[in-house]
Amino acid sequence: MADQPRWQSRLQDEEWHLQLTTREGWQQFAESEPAGLVLLGDRKWKELSDDERDLYDEARIDVHARLIIVATSAVRRIVTAGRRLTLLNKHAISARRGLIVSGAAGTGKTTSITQLGKTIHLLDRLRHPGQHHRIPVVYVTVPPAATARMLAVEFARFLGLPVIGKQNITDVTEAVCGVLLDARTSLVIVDEIHNLNLATRNGAEVSDQLKYFSERIPATFCYAGINVRREGLFSGTRGQQIAGRFSLIPTLRFPLDEEWTAVVATLEDALRLRHHAPGTLVDLDHYLHDRTKGMIGSLSHLIRGAAIEAVLDGSEKITRKTLEQINLDLAAEDDDLGLEE
């Protein structure tokens, strides 16, 4: 253990916990590779010192807490559609088209749009090596009860631009647009778009602010939110403008089919548990579907939670009993909640 293992140095990387809504956090997410962690057998694990064993187990917990992103058919579809739009919009002077990802909570919306962003980010780095001034992707969220200024400040915060006291929205907007133009931004991701209520004055002004950004910045805009059609995003004149410029891809619950079983298998292969029998979770695919209602977010939470529990309690394996000890979100547990688009 003279050379510090990669997993040990990764635990000491404080930047790992930066938020996606900052340039540094987004860049760290987009350019990071999956943590390399070789599963040690019982003999080698016992040969570690107490401190080394604790660090190794903590690293395994960290791997299970994040686990891997499964390239589901929905993720692939959204990434493909987003890349196509960025190419179509590349030379458009006006009326650039956008993408909206909508569905119930836990159906993989944020995962899909961040994977799209990661793809665009890495392609830009590949095409323009060493040009670190470029900011190919911006990721912001719409705050609850947002105003137009609040949204502009979210963009400024991502870029690290100072917003002084009562600086007016025009100054903030001009600063943001200036940086994004210089940085050659090609994709703007706006998450939590369901917080935008077009029926209110503030909501209407936020919509206008987004439209203004899209007109000033030659980038593809991608929105994501919970059941946006039901929430009224396409209502009224402003809603009709959005509907006329954006295509919509829904994220849905998984049916109990071959893809569901393949997703379970992929997550199981990523486990780093010393006594887990391969195929255990695949054999439980019906139970996992019933338990999670086919929602990818709930499935990921369940398996990650059970894996962490298996490390903490020393069992080093996931069984149905382990899974039953993990509490899920209310949407997965309650049949009476309306979750459909």
Image (tube, grey):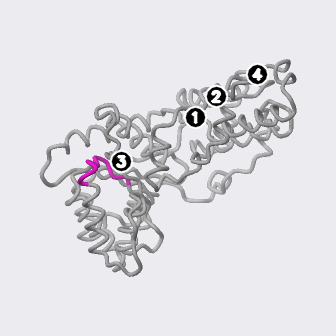
Residue type pointed to by label 4: Leu
Q: Residues within 10 Å of mark 4 (few under 14, many from 20)?
A: few
Assess whether residue 315 is covered by the magenta stretch.
Answer: no
Q: Which residue is mark 3?
A: 137
Q: Amino acid at mark 2?
A: Ala
Q: CA distance from mark 1 to mark 3?
A: 22 Å
Number of other residues with Cα within 10 Å of mark 1, as a class: few under 14, some 14 to 19, many 20 or more: some
Disc 1 marks a residue whose amino acid type is Ile
Q: Residues within 10 Å of mark 2 (few under 14, many from 20)?
A: few
Front-lying residue, 335 or 204 = 204
| Residue designated by label 2 | 270
For disc 3, the neighbor class at 10 Å (few under 14, some 14 to 19, many from 20) is many
| Relative vertical location of residue 210 with respect to residue 189 in this rendering, above or below | below
Which mark is on residue 40?
Answer: 4
Residue 182 lies in the magenta stretch: yes
> How far separated are the C-alphas under marks 2 and 1?
7 Å
- Secondary structure beneath dot 1 equals loop
Give the residue drawn at x 79%, y 41%: 309
Q: Looking at the rendered structure, which numbered label has been put on residue 68?
A: 1
Rounded to the nearest whole Å, what is the CA distance between mark 3 and mark 2?
28 Å
